[in-house]
Amino acid sequence: MVTLTIDGEQVTVAEGTTIMDAAKQVSIRIPSLCYLQGLIPHGACGVCVVEVEGERTITRSCVRPVQQGMKVHTNTPTLRNIREMLVELLLSNHPAECFVCERGETCELKDLASTLGVKDIRFDTKPPKFEVDDSSVSIVRNPNKCVLCGRCIRVCSGIQTVEAIDFVNRGDTLIVGPGADKGLGESNCVNCGQCIHVCPVAAITEKSCINEVWDAIDNAEKHVVVQEAPAVRVALGEELGLPPGTLVAGKMHTALRKLGFDTVFDTNFAADLTIIEEGNELVKRVKEGGTLPMITSCCPGWIKFMEEFYPDLIPNVSTCKSPQQMFGALAKTYFAGAANIDPSRIVSVSVMPCTAKKYEAQRPEMCSSGYRDVDYVLTTREIARMIREAGINFAELPDKPAESLMGAYSGAATIFGTTGGVMEAAIRSAYKIITGEELEKIDIMPVRGMSGVKIATVEIGGLKVKVAVAHGLGNARPILDEIRAGKSPYHFIEIMACPGGCVGGGGQPIGFDMAIRSLRGETLYSEDKFSTVRKSHENPSIKKIYEDYLAEPLGEKSHHLLHTKYTPQDNVSKLKNILANLKSR
Amino acid sequence: MTTSVLAGDIKGFESKDQKLKLYNKLQEIIDGHRNAVGAPIRIMQLTQEYCGYLPLPVLEVISKELDISFSQLYSILSFYHFFTTVPKGKYVIQVCKGTACYVKGGQKILDSLHKEFNLAPGGITADGKFSLDMVRCLGCCGLSPVMAVGDDVYRKVKPGQIKDILTGYK
Ligand code: SF4
Ligand code: SF4
Ligand code: SF4
Ligand code: FES
């Protein structure tokens, strides 16, 4: 332990603690910009400077470890001047567009300027000079707003191990990007959107399709169908001013009807369907000696990651589409038939916690209904913006369920939204498929919670089924490397790209705080706990769709509408494809 | 590795034979230095020596072989003025835009190169003979404005002389 004084107060902390963290213990929040809890500090911005008695120069408190007997001052005229000057310099380089900026109240630069009492900018402001990168279908990068804090680089490499972006060039042409004039859409970015959460400003945002959705709603010719992912119902309230973790499933359905969507369904229905298909696929692989371990496929961020970095594991990945895409394919077939609407008139919209779903919906193969299965994907933040634009007082709305045909859901479906949820839901139904009996203790506690990797062994009909759950792509790598080395002990693995699972998706309310993500997850578990139906195979609408339309799990219709295949996207595979095409011509 | 180098479109290495030689050379450079301290820099330096510049398909190969992401490799490359991803001319022209040269008419040299040879900073002439770099100081401010062609330095250059100077290079 090390004892030091900060602004006259004595504090004792563990060796290696930074001055910034030590200061928190004496109720001092040192201003900062490039620092973010959960990321390795980088010391880029200089806003967190402090003075240490006896030292000639000021020092950056986010990277400076404490020393025995140190006397630190965090609030002196020199420091206030320096901080103010630094922020003024940043502002002089930043477009003054706060009125029309989508970050609104969540902008840390604006917050910092007002916290530090910056009243005017003594330097000439510069006009924007960089091109906006909108090459990605999920994410837009605007280097003109970037403050070069490097947080996005650190989340992309340190947490996600994708390394899609880095600092490029130097001096006044320094930007963050994939390099070589490539856009994000041409890079190995997996569209997880975690960089949006850590960006202090609006330099990274989702690619919005609010206007297209309004157009569809306003077009009387079109029948607009909407689905909402599990994790949206525990975050939309938060985005609209309710406490984090508030469950707003019923208000959400009501709000969507008020916005003018013609039919309000729920992705949770498709989550139950996924469990039936995926559970049967797993059982088939186990019984018939198929490729094991099987890995879940509901997360398009993980899927792109796999195609980029682990294309050799394609046989391990379940062929099931994600719930979003299963829903989309059925909206323009099953629902179109049941409601007697020409599928060409149906516009299929989804509301997702996720930026990668925008990419997934646009993948070329995702049109098994004969049309684009999902036309537009809105994030939680975008639907909240629409609700605000429409002047709806969300907090006062009554609770209404979704339309039952493709909207009724079990508790198992709702926990899909948090890490471990798919695994738990699958175990509940796989038990029934294998043994013909119902699982009694359906709360699978070892796969819950926020540790990066969770493992469990579940006994199903005499078979010891070994499972693993990973969230955050960096956490998935060791498990994947094990499979690659032929040493994996598991039967079934769940992988979600975002830390926390979809509750922490790239489209959720801005923030990188795992405590809040965990709170959202807890709410999903309590919705499950209080549901009357808690297993996917007991959802009456699921029974109905197999009776009326799909006939059987893994059957011909399912194969066509609900399953998919994957394409290696790493450079070597891409070039091999090019060569093969050339030769075959 | 063969596939990516051979499939890529690489200026200056269009024929199969050239590509094969490039492939062998690249293999040799990478294998010789992959464990060296600062391997990416050393390997890019030697590759640029051989190719005259760093073609993108070659960078993809280096990134793959060294197991370093493309963005990180490019980040290193773009930090150093020395590295270039576009081919350089047979003769590299350097025009100084440091304070002294700028005051004495460095910009006029640039204008005239642009007008008469369609050559802009960072660019290359259609015949591949000359490329142009803008520099901050050539270290002889007393002689400004200064222009260098390859290893030759020309002092107190007037825009009218440029054509004559360049026709001397074959
Ligand atoms: S979306 Fe994810 S993969 Fe893409 S740049 Fe951001 S953090 Fe990296
Ligand atoms: S894009 Fe955002 S997170 Fe990334 S360096 Fe710029 S300001 Fe920081
Ligand atoms: S974890 Fe969920 S929110 Fe994140 S990329 Fe995957 S599907 Fe999207
Ligand atoms: S917060 Fe410490 S240097 Fe940026």
Image: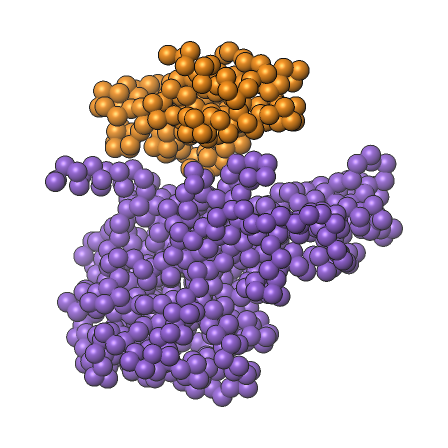
Give the answer, above or below, for where A584 lies relative to B158.
below
Which residue is located at x 53 percent, y 49 percent? Answer: A143
Does residue A90 appear to the left or right of A193 in the view shown? right
A64 or B167: nearer the viewer: B167
B130 or B163: nearer the viewer: B163
Does residue A157 appear to the left or right of A565 in the view shown? right
Question: Quarter holding the N terminus of chain A?
Answer: top right
Q: Colour of chain B?
A: orange
A70 or A101: nearer the viewer: A101
Q: How many marks?
A: 0
**Residue A365, percent from left and from top:** 24, 58
Q: Which chain is purple?
A: A
Would residue A150 be visible to someone looking at this image? Answer: yes
Does residue A53 appear to the left or right of A237 in the view shown? right
Give the answer, above or below, for where A522 lies relative to A471.
below
**Residue A330, percent from left and from top:** 25, 73
Does residue A233 appear to the left or right of A319 in the view shown? right
